[in-house]
Image (spheres, rainbow, N blue to C red):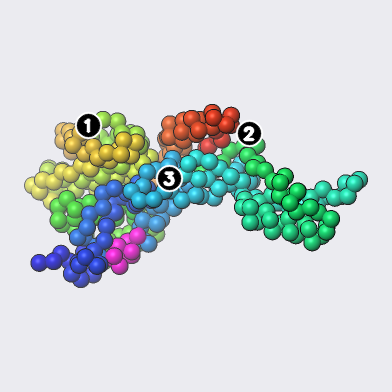
Amino acid sequence: MPKRCRGCDQPLTKDNDSDAHVIPQALGGRLAPRGILCSKCNGVLNDVADLPLVRAFGAWPTLLDVPRQHGKQPSKMVETRKGYNVSLESDGSMMRRDVVYDVAPIPDGHNVVIGAGHMKTARQLIAKAKAAFPQLDVAEAEKHLKVVALPPDDEIKLSVDFSPQAVFGGILTAVWIFLIHTTGRAFLEFDALLKCIKSMQEHGGTFRYFVEELPGLKGPTVRFGHKVIARSVPATGELIVYVEILGVLKVGGLFAKGLPGHELEHVYAYDLAQKAERSSEFTINGALFDVQDWRKAGLGIADAPALRAHFGDVLTSLSEIYYKQRLASVSSADGEEPQSVKPAT
Ligand SMILES: [Zn+2]
């Protein structure tokens, strides 16, 4: 009996079966079971849930060089506080992308200033100057092009949008795929899942944000990684879920009710710094976990100032560890200081 797609109920074959990423590939991926979704339905979930979640992280995955299973993080355009456009590469380098063309008369003739992010654009601007000033020596002008860094006191602005509207759909999708993978059960039909994602994107949802470790979770400190946890509380029959992405975004809460006596506990943990799954090192202390009021645990969206401060702190500290150290080791060779990085507030 071939497995059927949980979205459209078509039989899954080697041609239409797809990797159902629990955490989007752009955010580090890893756990991606097959035999759950056809590529078409997977594409639907990708568009409605994964893309908004990936966009919510802005240029951070590139800045932190989050290791992907396939390929590299793409370069991202970011803006600096002084208004320059910079392209950020996954190797940590930054290049100004501003296009400048400025002509000013000086006693001997004209001073032409040209700036561009690409040689192609720079050459086009030189050609433009040549048309206006036929005496311009193009080869000489090209020889004088040089790489310009950011002013040392400038900073790039990296925005994040961890609002329920931006991220809860992706969290719900991660849980949905994870539960099918671990229990074989969907808990929500595909259509209901899509409705639920839409409702969360329009009205927010009941999930909560966690800033400390999840109550009752015991295990090693994994600062830069993913976790997905599902546990039913025996006394209430509630199914509690939790998703942590890059060690930054931690969201969880009540996922389903009406499972009394139904015992379910699944913990997945992946360490991106070590590139290793570490699920078996974690356990849940039921005495602590089960007594939480999951409707009030952690922070809600009403605690926006505390949440903003938390995301600012954790991203800044990750950039200290995974960006500045990496860049310092590269730039000590050519004598450049690492550029500073701050989340926009
Ligand atoms: Zn399908």
Neighbour tally class for label 1: few under 14, some 14-19, many 20 plus, Cα within 10 Å: few
**Of 128 and 231, which appears nearest the observer?**
128
The residues tagged by marks 3 and 1 sit, at their Cα atoms, a distance apart of: 27 Å
Taking the magenta stretch, the answer to whether it contains residue 41 is yes
Where residue 301 sits in the image (x, y, percent)? 40, 45
> Disc 2 residue type?
Pro
Q: Which of the 4 image quadrants contains residue 7?
A: bottom left
Q: Name the residue under label 3.
A: 61
Question: In this rendering, does residue 304 appear at all?
Answer: no
Q: What stretch is highlighted in magenta?
A: 39-46
Of mark 3 and mark 1, the one earlier in the sequence is 3
Viewer-nearest of labels 3 and 1?
3
Element on which disc 3 rests: helix
Q: How many marks?
A: 3
> Residue at position x 34%, y 36% from top?
273
Give percent across and percent down for residue 97: 61, 49
For badge 1, the amino acid type reads Lys
Q: Left or right: 127 with respect to 288?
A: right
Residue shown at 20% from the left, 33% from the top: 281
Q: What element carries label 2?
A: loop
State the SS at label 1: strand
Pointer 3 and pointer 1: residues touching (CB < 8 Å)?
Answer: no
Q: Which of the two labelled residues, at mark 3 and mark 2, occupies the earlier sequence position?
A: 3
**Residue 241: within the magenta?**
no
Q: CA–CA distance between discs 1 and 2? A: 43 Å
Q: Looking at the rendered structure, which numbered label has been put on residue 152?
A: 2
Residue at image x 48%, y 30%? 329
Q: Residues within 10 Å of mark 2 (few under 14, many from 20)?
A: few
**Residue denoted by label 1:** 218
Whether tag 1 and tag 2 are in contact, CB under 8 A, the answer is no
Q: Is residue 154 left or right of residue 321?
A: right
